[in-house]
Amino acid sequence: MGAEFVQFSLTPILIGVFAAIACALPGNFLILRRQALIGDAISHVVLPGIVVAFLLTGMVAAIPMMIGAAGAAILAVILIEAVKRLGQIEPGAAMGVVFTTMFAAGVLILEQSDTSQVHLDVEHALMGNLESLIWFRADGWGSLLDPAALASLPDELPRIALVCALVVVLTLVFWRWLKIATFDEGFAQALGIPAAAVGFGLMVTAAVAAVAAFDAVGSIIVIAMFICPPAAARLMTNRLAHQVWWSVAFATMSAILGYVFAGYGPLWFGAQNAVSAAGMIATVSGVILGLACLFGPHRSRVGAGRDEAA
Amino acid sequence: MQTFLDALFLQAGYNAALVAIGAALLGFAAGSAGTFLFLRKRALVSDAVAHATLPGVGLAFIVMVSLGGDGRSLLGLLAGSALTAWIGLLLIEWITRRTRLAEDAAIGAVLGVFFGLGVVLLTVVQSMSAGRQAGLETFLLGSTAGMLYEDAVVIAVGGSLTVLATSLLRRPMTLVAFDSEYAAAMGYDVRRIDLLMMGLVMAVTVIGLKLVGLILIVAMLIIPAVTARFWTDRSHRVIWIAGAAGGASGYLGAVISASAPSMPTGPIIVLVAAAIFVVSLFFAPGRGVLAAVLRHRRFQARVHRRQGLLALAAQHPIREAYTVRLLAREGLVRPDGVPTDAGRAQAAKVARDERRWDVAREVHQDAGLTGRYDGLTPIEEVFTRDEIDEFDRRLGPPMGLGDV
Amino acid sequence: MASPMSPGQQPTIATENGRAARPVAVPSGAPLAVRGLTVSYGEKPAVFSVDATFPAESMSAIIGPNGAGKSTLLKASLGVIPRLSGDVYVFGQAIEKARERIAYVPQRASVDWDFPTTVMDVVQMGLYRRVGLLGRLSGRMAARARDCLDRVGMADFAHRQIGQLSGGQQQRVFLARALAQDADLYLLDEPFAGVDAATERAIIDVLKTLKAEGKAVVAVHHDLSTVRDYFDHVFLINVRRIAEGPVATAFTTGNLQATYGGRLAATHLDELSPTGGA
């Protein structure tokens, strides 16, 4: 069990956990700012980003594709803002216009260019392939101390770990600005805090997290991780700091349970093949949110938690 | 070129013609149904509905196969997708109503989770049909390649039915979309009409699945509605214009797609719709960007001109360089800000108008008239010639500005 | 239409409505002065070419009908919304250099009271500029925040979630946050809107104490019947500056009629200003 677990399950689970946390952290502020669906928009435009990056560089390498995806995400954020302001259109519709158009352009370019011989297809981009990120050279827990084995870790792991750490650091450093610019933008501006820049920085951070997570787990799962853990967390507490901790816990739980259920669940039902781990992680996060909606101590808008007052 | 013209005039084969007509009808229905969503500020609900169809497709396939069928019957798959889309809709409503979460969070949660579940079910389907292509992936992005005659008929008939339903339901839906409280006061059941509206959106989504796929059907519901908003402020026209824009995108998209290789129908339809949107965004009269920029610059110039003349009248220096440039261009001041004779005359006129307004406010205790004094509206637009003469009589003879 | 030049004749700007010709120079010491301020939403000016000077050690009210640009004037002064033209001086300096000296109480309705935070958290937001991004919130500062809550009578509610407060209590929390800023100029946007009588008394007591400490208070105000009791100085606005000055001389029937037009019944005006007329 030990050796097999380290070889086949440890790295996908770690990647899943880091991806989930990296998305859930900015997600907390996005849902409080009523911008939850920016994650939806970003995860759709990742596809055109990598397609264009592939066409420009001609190679299926992670770094240029991530740069392309991040560029597309930031372009989408800017375009959404532009359509919103220029056309005086409500944010949801502006998002819908921009991300569907960019996605359509991505699919068209993909079909037009000759990418059949390389592994670059839409379904993979959407669904991810967490199961394949195994650690070949590992033969047990001892491999964690073996430099040769460590060198063969899938590249996705250090990348997502780095991005996750970056998101954690940004959240801690800008905690006060994020909090005040989210709660009371006008007051933040009156204090001289660049509230608009904070909002834009949050979206860029979300885009970077989405792109890194996409690299590992596919783009659609990213939306679930942006929204479900923070939304469930919001129903558990009335303190922002506590909410963020809860969201990290829920994200971690979703990633671990989702991976385990996807790998071993079908066996319990007598089936042979595992199901999509990324899909199962999203499903588990949905179940957690459902439970929070039914039983979360602070689930309703009024009347909840009166007892908190000392 | 010839293939394009053939396709344009429906000469490129029976299936292609049916698809083009179906796409036009679907585009029309999507555009007009999407208008209600857009006006109700719930455009992205359609995104959740679309993604929530995926588990239904997977489930329907599994059920049909386990009942001994082939599993690929389009009608069966669409029925399954409608079922889970409806469940997704109800969940969004439930979350928004029963918890403190806002609608955008509910939409995103349903979207992500249902899609995740759908992906899980697709992997189950893959292992069930080991070796054989179930082809369910085409529901992600749509595909008219290899479309059966029956599929084309489903699209054409479904498109017609949704157009019919939209025109039947347009009155109550318009009312609710524009002013739900008023509709409620008139005795309409707003919640039921909202659900009907969602049902229509769901129908469009399900019918569009095979054609454009679940990710891009959202575009057909949103883009034409947003486009139409640039061209008119009247509700019934928005619906028709959105329908026309949607229908044109659907038809042209299907035609272009049929006339060239590697032109997937869904993305082409969306890009045609997006092109119409971009043209409207920039060039629509009234609400377009170009018109707005010109209007804003004229407005800013008017404000600065007026403020500059007021400063001259009060014998204050003009502080802002832009104002000086503006007045200098009209020959009202010298480049160093000192007024010319013409400038003095204009300033005196402006100062006199200011004082006329002061009198007007005393004479007419009527907010409807004096409330229009925003500093820019010429007094001649608000009062008649003899009324202004009366103000002048009270003010005494005209005065000029003394030499500075 | 342009009137001809009449040499020697000085322009006499009408004075009936307190609209005397104003000095050009920017007052160096005034807590808040705006010059030529124009703000517009779209094609209609919300505030047009307004000059205003709010005096030190006093309480000033910004008065005018709905949609007359009262809040806009306040927010544009703070740089919260962009100006089309004009300048703002706080104690004779540009706003950016004087932010530390301003405290701001936004309209209660401008924030989401369902936000997951406590009363104490909100008050501490008033200290954010001082402590910076990562600076430690010292025990002295925390004590200060508690003290500010105490001043508005909310010390017992420090750990309550803000969504559970009444409207009056929410307003007190906002005032406590402004007090925590320890400023010299307090700008309040409709501090008495929708609050109970006890809260109104509590707020006015705090504001009067501030004035006694030598601070300047500027509030957007709605209720004409309390202007004489609460304020020393008024600024009447209806897109344009209508009048400004001490309550005794500027808060007159004539000025109010000029501000509100026909929307204010004459009998009501007589009650408000016993001197009657300009």
Image: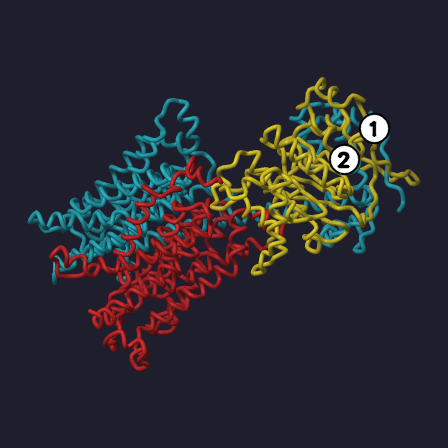
Image colour for chain B is cyan
* Tag 2 residue: C233
In this picture, is C249 found above or below A164?
A: above
Q: Of B87 and B140, which appears nearest the observer?
A: B87
- Residue at 33% of width from left, 38% of height from top? B94
Q: Is residue B145 left or right of residue A236?
A: left
In front of the other: B326 or A182: A182
Instruction: Label the red chain with its letter.
Output: A
On residue B395, the disc is 1
Position in image of residue B36 (x %, y %): 38, 37
Snapshot quadrant of residue B205? top left
Q: What chain letter is assigned to the residue under label 1?
A: B
Mark 1 lies on a secondary structure that is: helix
Question: Which tag is nearer the camera, tag 1 or tag 2?
Answer: 2
**Is residue B253 in view?**
no
What is the three-letter code of the residue carrying label 1? Leu
- Answer with left or right where residue C194 lies relative to residue A235: right
Question: Numbered disc 2: what chain?
Answer: C
Mark number for residue A65?
none
Q: Are marks 1 and 2 in contact (CB under 8 Å)?
A: no
From this viewpoint, which residue is outermost toward the front?
A310
Pointers 1 and 2 within a single chain: no
Distance between mark 1 and mark 2 Cα atoms: 29 Å
Give the chain letter for yellow. Answer: C
